[in-house]
Amino acid sequence: MTRSAPFSLDHDALLDDLAATDNLLIIQDLDGVCMGLVGDPLTRQLERRYLDAARRLDGHFFVLTNGEHIGSRGVNGIVEAHFATPDRAGEQGRYLPGLAAGGVQWQDRFGDVSHPGVSDAELAFLAAFPAKAEQFLDARLAEPPYALDSACRRDLIAAAVLDNLASPTLNLNVFHRHWQTAPERYRQLQQDVAAFMQGQLEAADEAGLGDAFFVHYAPNAGHDEAGNERLRESVEREGRSTSAGTTDFQFMLRGAVKEVGVLVILNRYYHRHTGHYPLGEAFNAREAPRDHDALLALARDHFDPALMPTIVGVGDTVTSFTETTEGRHQRLRGGSDRGFLTLVQQLGETFDSGNRVLFVDSSGGEVRRPGVDADRLAEQLQGAEVDIWPALEGITDPDDPLKLDVIFPDGHGQYIDFFCALAARR
């Protein structure tokens, strides 16, 4: 599709384009894309029609998420809720295939899960993390400035500590809601939790696992000079919080970054369609390079351009904002989907494969984050002389190297309609 505007809202034209593309690979985030963002992950829901469409796209659709497939907070339990018995989901191949935990937890559509490249010692350290997080929060929240009573602490901590197997997480959404009118408490807790996460990295180092883990902030403010993700502090106005900033603090395995997961999925896609693993059968996120230039070089050297699919990357967590420090303005770009969407864009440019980047506005959920001004965006795309960029404030900017090809301003429901229509057309 050709257009003069930098973004498109023409979902019908995109549908026609992708329905006619034989060699198609969809790589899609989950939370905020195919289900609404919620404060408590245990309340998440998936539509049955979405699962049916994913099954019809078998071999051309994979998920790439920082959440997990398995465990009490995993997506598999949400899938199983649609069937009379949990084993039916596996028998019918209705699980969502692809990578979880940032790229280190692989699952096929029958629910077979593995952790390529992950050691028993690493899994054991991760397994001990939730109990440590609960103890830390209970002790800290009993002290000033929080001074919460034991019953309140118990309920908040139960919702905040996510006992994921490969990516245990502290989700502070419940605290953001609790202190909506006292945002300084929430902002202090962000700092306290960041310090706790740093302490866990130091504990891993003392246990001989010094380079095994890193801390993922979602959403984040990009990376610092050392390559570590920046915490995004909450923003308040008139005594109330207007942006939660970083809500998820994930203790993750080194190499578990979504952009690496793109190559892991692409390697398996080539095998599925050609019988050959271009990067080797054992290739996994733990052994892959971590910067985009090296990932692109790896792809150029090993993937046959004639067989390269059109890759469609779908995400919802992309941020761009200006931070002012001592009178100096600095543009910070981040978001947990930025890395993999950027690599999808770069692979499309490198292989001339027509890759697409789709952005789903997830601001309508329970988690406060920047949203698209759909009316302003539509006016500009219809030829009105208006500045388009205020419509995407907090998400992207005129100089952003990541270009969002098609936007779904009405959220995950609008994207599911499109996804199901695409599956039916193919």
Image (cartoon, grey):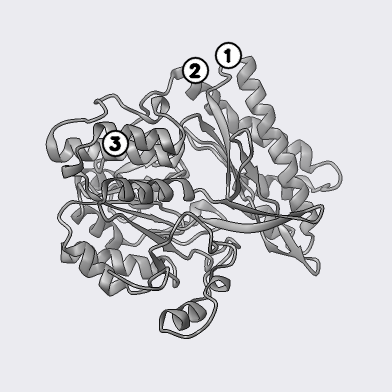
* Position of residue 394 measured from the top left corner of the image (x, y, whole percent): 59, 63
Name the mark on residue 62.
none
Q: Which residue is mark 2?
A: 121
Task: Name which residue type carries label 3.
Answer: Arg
Q: Disc 3 vs disc 2: which is toward the camera?
A: 3
Q: Is residue 355 left or right of residue 404?
A: left
Q: Are marks 2 and 1 in contact (CB under 8 Å)?
A: yes
- Mark 3 to mark 2: distance in Å? 34 Å
Vertical position of residue 40 compared to residue 305: above or below: below
Task: Name which residue type carries label 2.
Answer: Ala
* Position of residue 301 measured from the top left corner of the image (x, y, whole percent): 27, 31
- Name which residue lies at 41% across and 32% down: 294
* Position of residue 110 measured from the top left corner of the image (x, y, whole percent): 24, 41
Dividing the image into 4 quarters, which one contains the C terminus?
bottom left
Q: Earlier in the sequence, mark 3 or mark 1?
A: 1
- Mark 2 to mark 1: distance in Å? 10 Å
Q: Which residue is mark 1?
A: 208
Q: Could you tell me which secondary element the residue under label 1 belongs to?
A: loop
Crowd rating for badge 3 (residues with CA inside 10 Å; few <14, some 14–19, many 20+): some
Task: Name which residue type carries label 1.
Answer: Gly
- Mark 3 to mark 1: distance in Å? 35 Å
Q: Which residue is mark 3?
A: 300
Dividing the image into 4 quarters, which one contains the N terminus?
bottom left
- Name which residue lies at 53% across and 64% down: 398
Crowd rating for badge 1 (residues with CA inside 10 Å; few <14, some 14–19, many 20+): few
Q: Is residue 22 left or right of residue 140?
A: left
Q: Earlier in the sequence, mark 3 or mark 2?
A: 2
* Position of residue 12 measured from the top left corner of the image (x, y, whole percent): 27, 74
Q: Nearer the viewer, residue 84 or 201?
A: 201
Q: Disc 2 vs disc 1: which is toward the camera?
A: 1
Q: Could you tell me which secondary element the residue under label 3 belongs to?
A: helix
